[in-house]
Amino acid sequence: MGDITGKVWGNTMEIINNDGFGFHRIFIKKGGYCSKHKHNFKTNMFYCESGLLKIKVWKNEYELIDETILEAGDQTKVKPGEHHQFEALKDTVAFEIYYLESLNDKDIDRESVGGQK
């Protein structure tokens, strides 16, 4: 198991963290919420294992705050540069995943096509 770090809203356990990828298991007490913040380069993805997790995103393209409520098995992502905040509507266990957008589908340059013999 990884190191658990206490937070005012619950705790977080860092499972992996390197230059291009981060993976944390978080426990948020009902009513707990994180700071409103943004990541300049990383996409922030949330996957809800149990509970109810509200994700608020302040959109850059228009004047609106998007709210998404995640139940067990749901996920959502926040683009780099967008302010966001989470809040637990019930005791919640979730996974917080950080990755660089440059690691996407368009990263591959194929010279041939796969197949089957």
Image (spheres, helix red, strand yellow):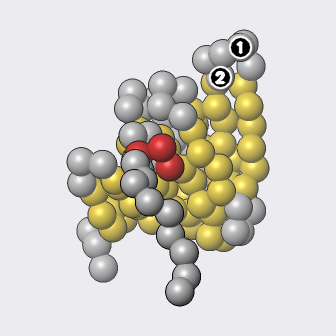
Q: How many callouts does the rendering have?
A: 2
In the figure, 115 relative to 79: above or below? Answer: below
Q: Nearer the viewer, residue 38 or 30?
A: 38
Identify which amino acid the numbered label 2 is placed on.
Answer: Lys
- Does the CB distance between marks 1 and 2 fall below 8 Å? yes
Q: Nearer the viewer, residue 100 or 12?
A: 100
Question: In the rendered image, which quarter is residue 33 located in?
Answer: top right
Q: Which disc number belongs to residue 106?
A: none
Q: Which mark is residue 59?
A: 2
Residue occupying image coordinates x 64% and y 31%: 57
Kindly report the distance in space between the C-alpha atoms of the residues bearing marks 1 and 2. Answer: 6 Å
Q: Secondary structure at mark 2?
A: loop
Question: Quick one: 21 or 111, which is closer to the camera?
Answer: 111
Neighbour tally class for label 2: few under 14, some 14-19, many 20 plus, Cα within 10 Å:
some
Which residue is at a point 40% across and 54% down the rendered structure image?
Answer: 111
Residue carrying label 1: 62
Placement of 64 over or under 20, stated as above or below: above
Query: Residue drawn at (57%, 67%), measured in percent from left and top?
Result: 93
Type of amino acid at the residue the image marks with label 1: Tyr
Report if residue 27 is visible in the image: no
Pinpoint residue 56: horizontal percent, then vertical percent. 66, 35
Is 96 displayed left or right of 74 in the figure? left
